Image: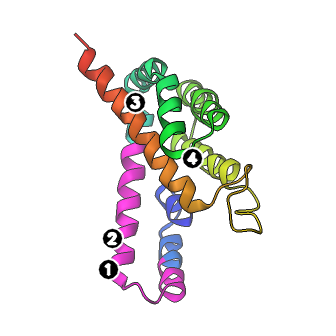
Amino acid sequence: MLILRFSLGHPTHIYQLTLCFSLFTFPQFDDSAIIVRFLDIYQVTQALATVLQNPKQMADMRRAWGQIDFESVRNQSALVCNCRHEDLVQLLEIDFVAVLERLATRSTEPVRDVIVWADECCDRLIGAGVATARGGEDRSTLSSRSVLIRWGYVTSQIMRDLVRLCCDLP
């Protein structure tokens, strides 16, 4: 999160501290890998900021998001990777729609709003306890690996639906 904060306008010394901390904490990574990772994250946040600050793109995004067939996404996700319907409804159809509306109306730091939403998603899905004492998944929380795999599948379903919508345009 420290790297993302730098890209949102914090001073350069935070980047230097982050790099030093990363090198100290993860000595198995060489300098170039950490710098490349930082640049990747920086580029993504800059591209995201450009899109989120463009009113036309935000209007297009809200319109497209409203046309996604979430029932199909929920059903496919439940069948393939056992995603819970109630989590998908809350995160994608309620919380993210609220984020999009907030971004369109009164957000002064749109990238930060998206990062906060992503953090809240992780908190909701991973929770305080990661797994039960028996090693299986608790019904209320998931392991971070499980969340990542499931999130990848759900986002691929959303992208599939958005591509389908884009191809259906006249």
Vertical side of 68 occupied by 47: above or below: below
Task: Report the residue marked by disc 3.
Answer: 54
Which residue, given by chain and number where applicable, does mark 4 sit on? 112
The prevailing secondary structure element of the residues shown in magenta is helix
For the residues bearing labels 4 and 3, Cβ distance under 8 angstroms: no
Dot 3 or dot 2: first in sequence order is 2
Q: Amino acid at mark 4?
A: Arg
- Name the kind of residue labelled 1 in the image: Ser
Local packing at callout 1 (Cα closer than 10 Å; few below 14, some 14-19, many 20+) is few
**Label 3 amino acid?**
Asn
Q: Earlier in the sequence, mark 4 or mark 2?
A: 2
Residue occupying the far top of the picture: 170
Task: Tell me where the magenta segment starts and ends, as one range.
Answer: 19-48
Element marked by disc 1:
helix
Q: Mark 3 or 1, which is nearer the eye?
A: 1
Lower position in the chain sequence, tag 3 or tag 1: 1
Q: Which amino acid type is marked by label 2?
A: Val
Residue under pointer 1: 32
Mark 3 nearby-residue class (10 Å; few <14, some 14–19, many ≥20): few
Residue underneath mark 2: 36
Estimate the spatial distance between the alpha carbons at disc 3 and disc 2, rounded to whole Å.
Answer: 27 Å
Q: Residue at x 51, y 49 (%)?
A: 150
**What colour scheme has been applied to the protein in the rendered image?**
rainbow
Residue sitting nearer the eye, 148 or 42: 148
